[in-house]
Image: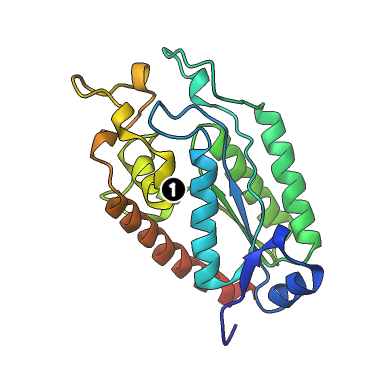
Amino acid sequence: MKGEIKWGYFDKMRPTQIEGIKKDYPIAYLPWGAIEYHGSHNPTGLDTHKAVHLCSLLAKEVGGLVFPPISLAANLIKSYPGVDFPNHSIEFSEKLIQLICEEYFEQLAEQNFKIIVLLSGHAGEPHLQILRDVASQFNKKYPEICFWTLAEFDVIPDHLLVANHSALGETSLQLYFEPETVDLDCLPKDRAITLEIDAVSGEDPRSSTMELGEKIANSFVENASGKLDDLIKKYI
């Protein structure tokens, strides 16, 4: 693993380009998102965009190939008890999520990737735990390969980011990555923000900034790349 970092988007590369990167950086990044209502102030694809951008930043730092995102998720906000957001979300079964993850992992293993990083931008449960469980099963099945499933908040200090839905953390990240997709003026100015009305779980998103989003993203890359450096020494 020496010289210039080699990375790219798997679906935008020709076979010789893919093999040229994979030879030195056999790392696959699988961004996993959702099509889900994220309130009036954020896009429905926030989880997907977040995962793609974070995977891309990590690949630039460490090397490897970023796969197209999977925008399929179970356990969306439309199914939360006590809320009524039936529109603007596309929800899939837990069984399907497990099956797709298993089939992706199997085929990435067949293509001789040595480290497979699945970053789930959607943290609904048991959706996230299903993806973690599949990784655990495949780590046992293929001990020479590392399957690492994580959510971004797994490697970021709590003072910067905790699990949230369209709140301060996620909204700040979206502002940093794609500011044109966020409109904070859509949020009410005369009352408290709630899950039931605004689809927000976590800190008040009205204080969101691009600067905070940049800090969160940088923290993710720093901590996740440190973990990957250790995995590279072991598996590559």
Q: Residue at x 43, y 63 (%)?
A: 221
Q: Position of residue 83 (x, y in %)?
A: 43, 14
Q: Residue at x 48, y 47 (%)?
A: 50
Q: Position of residue 187 (x, y in %)?
A: 30, 26
The image quarter in which residue 27 lies: bottom right
Q: Amino acid at mark 1?
A: Glu
Q: Is 123 on the left-hand or right-hand side of 97?
A: left
Q: Is 140 on the left-hand or right-hand side of 171?
A: right
Q: Nearer the viewer, residue 94 or 121?
A: 121
Q: Quadrant of the N terminus?
A: bottom right
Q: Residue at x 48, y 39 (%)?
A: 46
The image quarter in which residue 216 lies: bottom left
Q: Nearer the viewer, residue 30 or 56?
A: 56
**How is the rendered protein coloured?**
rainbow
Residue 84 seen by the camera: yes
Q: Quadrant of the C terminus?
A: bottom right
Looking at this view, name the residue that lies furthest to the left.
190
Would you place residue 18 above or below residue 88 in this image? below
Which residue is under mark 1?
178
Q: Residue at x 62, y 39 (%)?
A: 71
